[in-house]
Image (cartoon, rainbow, N blue to C red):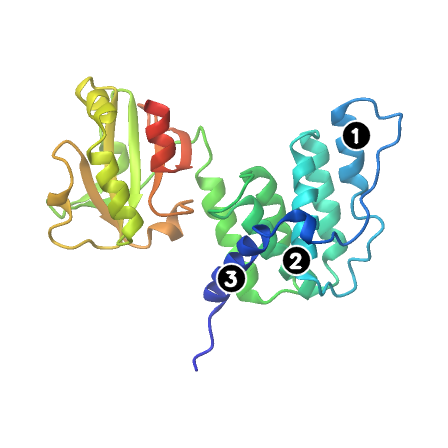
Amino acid sequence: MKRLNFIKVLVIALFTVHCATMVAQDEVPALFSYPQAPDTCTSLESRSNYVMMHFWDGFDLTKPITNDASLVKTFRDYVDVFRFGHRTVVLSSVRDFMFKLRSNAENLSKVGRIAEAVLYGPYADYWSDEVYVEFARSLAAATVLKKEEREYYQQQIGRMTACQEGMTLELDYVDAVTDQKMKLMDVPVSNVLLLVFMDSSVDSSIGRTRLATDVNLARLMDEGQVRVMCIYDGKPSSDWAASLPDGWVKGYSSNLTSKLDVRMMPSCYMLDAEHKIMNKNITIAEFKQAIE
């Protein structure tokens, strides 16, 4: 049997973490009793800040963590507090936590996979580029991890930092009709550009149909409010472009997910008239709900 490479192992691990999060929380014990904020912390933010900064104080992160389900639960509970704390305290807490983990490669690797599933992956309950990048930076710099593992997180950092909301998105692609090389910046937009990334999956096929038959989207396109551009990951079949509505811009790009921060297929980016990112990694269902 061939040895799975790191990316395949990570995909399996992320799915395992996702399945673990589906278990009822009261069925999985935490790794330890969580700290309680003192009465002097009178606001929700101050109490959250205290809990974050002392969350891992009573647990020895240098020893092997063998109960993966409890680690997932505890980590998720830790991240849940982030929503109510101050930004600088959140980032400081993450840096301190990852610093304590650095001496145990196995624990560090486990936390990396869980952090990706909880904060970055397609099933994440709480997407936060800023917070996840803090975890990824520690992982990319951890010499106790294997080189391919460090490089994986470094590549994630590169994709995320190049595709932040408010930034101008740059993308080279091939026109699926003419086979000419094009640049995204040359696509004229009057108001909003809906940039849809697809592949050969059934989900992409269904998503394409849902968009193509949406009356609200058709109306917005007729009014010049929205322009739709569909980019295929890889090279599509010869009849792919013909299967899309006439008013759509149709293109393809090789190794799309290695260039852009695309976390699922299909996935949508919303750009303004200057090609600046207004929103990213939204589902087709979320976009349809928004325009309804």
| Residue 2 to residue 123: above or below | below
Tell me if I can see residue 169 in this picture: no
Tell me if I can see residue 164 in this picture: yes
Is 142 left, or right, of 259 in this rendering? right
Q: Which residue is mark 1?
A: 47
Q: Position of residue 210 (x, y in %)?
A: 25, 37
Q: Amino acid at mark 1?
A: Arg
Which one is in front, 288 or 89? 288
Q: Position of residue 93 (x, y in %)?
A: 73, 41
Query: Alpha carbon of mark 2 to alpha carbon of mark 1: how far?
Result: 27 Å
Classify mark 3: residues with Cα within 10 Å, few (<14), some (14-19) or many (20+): some
Q: Position of residue 272 (x, y in %)?
A: 34, 24
| Residue 103 to residue 100: above or below | below
Q: Residue at x 24, y 26 (%)?
A: 217
Query: Alpha carbon of mark 3 to alpha carbon of mark 2: how far?
Result: 17 Å
Name the mark on residue 170. Answer: none
Q: Which residue is mark 3?
A: 10
Query: Alpha carbon of mark 1 to alpha carbon of mark 3: how far?
Result: 35 Å
